[in-house]
Amino acid sequence: MASVLIPVIVALTKGAVIPTPSGAAFASTSVVVTDSTGVAQAAVLLNGAETPTPWAFSTSVAPGIGSVTATDLDINGAVLGTPVTQGFSEAGPAPTFLPTTGITVTPV
């Protein structure tokens, strides 16, 4: 039985401006979501120009425990600083169904 995917919003918190260790300009933050299936989704590159909310995007995850890793990158693709990983637990909505409440037998 396939899991129902749960829509989520992934939003980054950005700190105060600091110099890049490499001296190369900041380019973007690569964000990878891995849900309870253990499969990493394709990286999403954020640069602060996202709408309607900068540094955020929506995706869907399978219910259960997963993680999100954000890695800041310079214009050469080099990692700036240390990647940040955040775990999450998405239970999702309770399963529902339409219960049988009666039967009608009709002559044809």
Image (tube, rainbow, N blue to C red):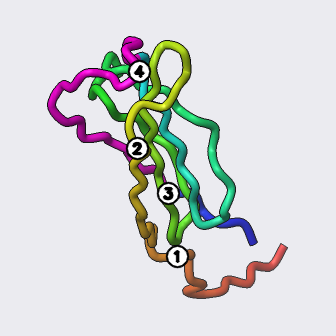
Question: Residue 39: x percent and y percent?
Answer: 68, 55
Using the numbered discs, state the Cα–Cα distance from disc 4 to disc 1 in whole angstroms: 50 Å
Side of 6 relative to 51 (left or right): right
Q: Amino acid at mark 1?
A: Pro
Which residue corresponds to mark 2? 82
Dominant secondary structure of the residues highlighted in magenta in the image? loop
Number of other residues with Cα within 10 Å of mark 3, as a class: few under 14, some 14 to 19, many 20 or more: some
Using the numbered discs, state the Cα–Cα distance from disc 3 to disc 2 in whole angstroms: 29 Å
Using the numbered discs, state the Cα–Cα distance from disc 4 to disc 3 in whole angstroms: 38 Å
Mark 3 or mark 1, which is nearer the start of the sequence? 3
Residues in magenta?
Answer: 6-26
Which residue corresponds to mark 4? 22
- Residue 50 against residue 103 in the figure, above or below: above
Mark 1 or mark 4, which is nearer the start of the sequence? 4
Q: Amino acid at mark 3?
A: Ile
Which residue corresponds to mark 3? 6
Q: Residue furthest left?
A: 16
Mark 2 or mark 3, which is nearer the start of the sequence? 3
- Residue 105 against residue 73 in the figure, above or below: below
Which residue corresponds to mark 1? 95
Mark 2 or mark 4, which is nearer the start of the sequence? 4
Question: Residue 79: x percent and y percent?
Answer: 49, 31
Q: What residue is shown at x 38% (from left), y 37% (from top)?
A: 81
Mark 1 or mark 2, which is nearer the start of the sequence? 2
Q: Secondary structure at mark 1?
A: loop
Number of other residues with Cα within 10 Å of mark 2, as a class: few under 14, some 14 to 19, many 20 or more: few
Q: Secondary structure at mark 4?
A: loop
Q: What residue is shown at x 75% (from left), y 72% (from top)?
A: 1
Using the numbered discs, state the Cα–Cα distance from disc 1 to disc 3 in whole angstroms: 12 Å
